[in-house]
Amino acid sequence: NAGVTQTPKFRVLKTGQSMTLLCAQDMNHEYMYWYRQDPGMGLRLIHYSVGEGTTAKGEVPDGYNVSRLKKQNFLLGLESAAPSQTSVYFCASCRPLAGGSYEQYFGPGTRLTVT
Amino acid sequence: GENVEQHPSTLSVQEGDSAVIKCTYSDSASNYFPWYKQELGKRPQLIIDIRSNVGEKKDQRIAVTLNKTAKHFSLHITETQPEDSAVYFCAASIGAGTASKLTFGTGTRLQVTL
């Protein structure tokens, strides 16, 4: 049981380049999320998905697109990278439990630098 | 939307002392309040959570208290140890019906010194 995995772990892009970050989970979770983490700003939600084929915007969606074609995968795309998108990106998944616990399981993160 | 404020941003305590981190939230509909611990270079991991129908919850050396009226909740760590050194994040969620989205605080870097 690998939990939540992310590919790649590190990436350096030039301004204007595009890339896709892959998140995969093997826990059969319905909900999946993409966050970015910047120093002093905590974790901010970019996009999320409540099930296969559905996506929605989070707090900071501009400049990113997502797709959830399969339940276990959630892809985050940067169409034209900007230096402001330099960050650590975390994927997470969740399955609401009886009693109201909504523990989110995080992936190991992707460190992206845009020059 | 929900806004979560967290204080202090850094906290240094001596081993064996207690540490307290405080958070406030803005949306009275929030009913789920987790705390995550993130060690350097690692992923955030849930350490304790509380729902709005409970005022306090304890798990060994960590406890969380919730004051719904004042819209604030706190993390208490007793008998701190060097392995407690990490960044701690509080969060709030309306929970079911909103995709269990979490709004995080900005984090508290806890350093436990020998």
Image (spheres, rainbow, N blue to C red):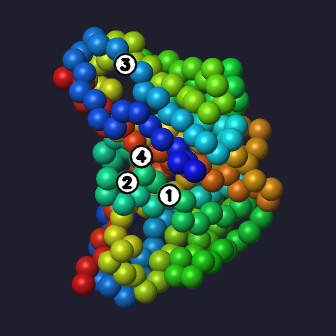
- The C terminus of chain A: image quadrant: top left
Q: Nearer the viewer, mark 1 or mark 4?
A: 4
Up/down of B70 relative to B77, above or below: above
- Cα gap from disc 2 to disc 3, whole angstroms: 23 Å
Residue corresponding to mark 4? A108
Are discs 1 and 4 both within one chain?
no
Residue corresponding to mark 2? B42
Q: Nearer the viewer, mark 3 or mark 1?
A: 3
The local secondary structure at tag 3 comes to strand
Residue type of the residue flagged with mark 3:
Met
Neighbour tally class for label 2: few under 14, some 14-19, many 20 plus, Cα within 10 Å? few
Residue corresponding to mark 1? B45
Q: Describe residue B50's horizontal placement relative to residue B24 as left or right.
A: right
Q: Residue at x 47, y 24 (%)?
A: A76
Q: Which chain letter goes with mark 4?
A: A
The local secondary structure at tag 2 comes to loop
Are discs 3 and 4 both within one chain?
yes
x then y, percent, for residue A25: 58, 40
